[in-house]
Image: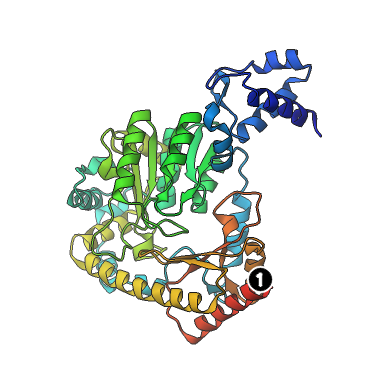
Amino acid sequence: MYKSEQLALSLKHLIESGAWKANEKLPSLRQQAQISGFSLITVMNAYQELEAQGLIYSKEKLGYFMAEAPNSLEIAKTVILNEKIEINSTVFRYLKSIQSENIVPFGIAFPDSQLLYSTKLMQTLAQRAKHHQSYEQVPSLPPGNLELRKVIAQRYCMQGIPTDPSDIVITSGGLDALNLALQTLTKPGDYILLQETIFYGAWQAAEHLGLRVITIPEHPKHGLDLEAFKNAISNYPIKVCLLMLNSHNPIGFTVSDEIKLQLAKLLQEHHIYLIEDDVYEELYFDHKKPLSMKYFDQQNLVFHCSSFSKTLGASLRIGWVYAGKFSENIQHLQFISTLSVNSFLQNSLAAYLSHRYYEKHLKSLRHTLKRLKNQYYQYLIKNLPDTCIVHYYPSGYFLWLTLPEHINSNVIYQTMLEQNIGIASGILFYRTEKIPHHLRINCSFELTESIKQALSQLVKSIINFQR
């Protein structure tokens, strides 16, 4: 056992005996080194181990403090500190492995490109390309095309969210919007809160920016576990939350308006910022579009990030962030990094959105995705053993599979890849020492014979590993 582990174990016994009260300051690193006789490095490693267990927490320049005593053991089980995140290499290798045209694309993040093709958008692009407008001669500077920002602002207003075009900053897709928002609100070492299972781009951003991540588990019924959320913000100095609440990727749930309202009140009470990843907001199956957290925001604490890439295609990487009073900050960061999106694309998209073409396209897209998702779901629940759970929610184009815990979904992924079938293993979406036993399936492709054969191969592989 390392010296730091010995010290951590001794301190844990002191904590459990009630030596310190909740939120009481612990001896400093130097003081603890003098008391214990260990080096500063050993003491620091021991404190970080206790922090990872949820027993203590740190405040910048102030030191370490005791976590809430009554909940400390419960928090250690449900709220997890992820301090050293290493996922970028994993994601890079995964994306490289499924990029071949020969791979059945169950693992990709975008819908089938054939569903996203819009004849009217292509016509608009062609018409604009024929005319050499002045906008083509100037740099694409933040905050982006004014007409496009006006159209986006109008769409917010139609949802009951008062919005001015100056609140909007156009970005190079949804992930760029998330990264810019995180950079605006955090600095290395800050605590942010994520859902335990979430789109890998959030983990990548946290790793890149050197952030400490607190995760909370999903609620089996409501999606977001409010009690775990309360525990986390009460015991850690959370600065920012990054959440997916509508058509969650990869699981698929949409959090109810009642839960969103309670969440908004907690954010306001503790003055915590929320970055909402809402790139699937238009892909709902019901008649009513789900509300974003921006609707419940009373103190400008919510950054709403979205994109057109999931509805109009991966090549049209145009997103935006509703930044409000932080618009200037976002623009300054954008100016020294990605600048803005190509002015020709922005201008063409603004013209396309100004008509009813987009609404007709969305209506058709939702109808098709609903039909396909139901077909995939019916096939899987009919052919998979009862020990496998297929999670179905009425939105988006992903199905989330929970396999028996002894089945390693990463091994399933490798096995399928050898048969030119791509799937997304749970290892991409959560950081845990346990064996990953979840899969995400993209079900936006028509069930042709080749697609059915690929699904059949996946089912056989799962059954074989279960034996």
Quadrant in which residue 460 is drawn: bottom right
**Total numbered labels placed on residues in the image:** 1
Rendered image coloring scheme: rainbow
Q: Name the residue nearer the viewer: 259 or 87.
A: 259
- Where is 239 relative to 381, above or below? above
Residue under the point 26% across and 56% down: 347
Q: Position of residue 94 (x, y in %)?
A: 60, 61
- Rendered view: 40 above or below 258: above
> Residue 13: in sight, yes or no?
yes
Q: Which residue is mark 1?
A: 466
Residue 153 left/right relative to 409: left
The residue tagged with tag 1: helix, strand or loop? helix
- Could you classify mark 1 by the number of other residues whose Cα lies within 10 Å: few (under 14), some (14-19), or many (20 or more)? some
Q: Quadrant of residue 99?
A: bottom right
- If the image is split into quadrants, where does the C terminus sit? bottom right
Q: Nearer the viewer, residue 74 or 47?
A: 74
Q: Position of residue 285 (x, y in %)?
A: 30, 66
Residue 376 is situated, as x and y percent measured from the top left of the image, at 45, 75
Residue 84: give x, y in percent of width and height. Answer: 63, 40
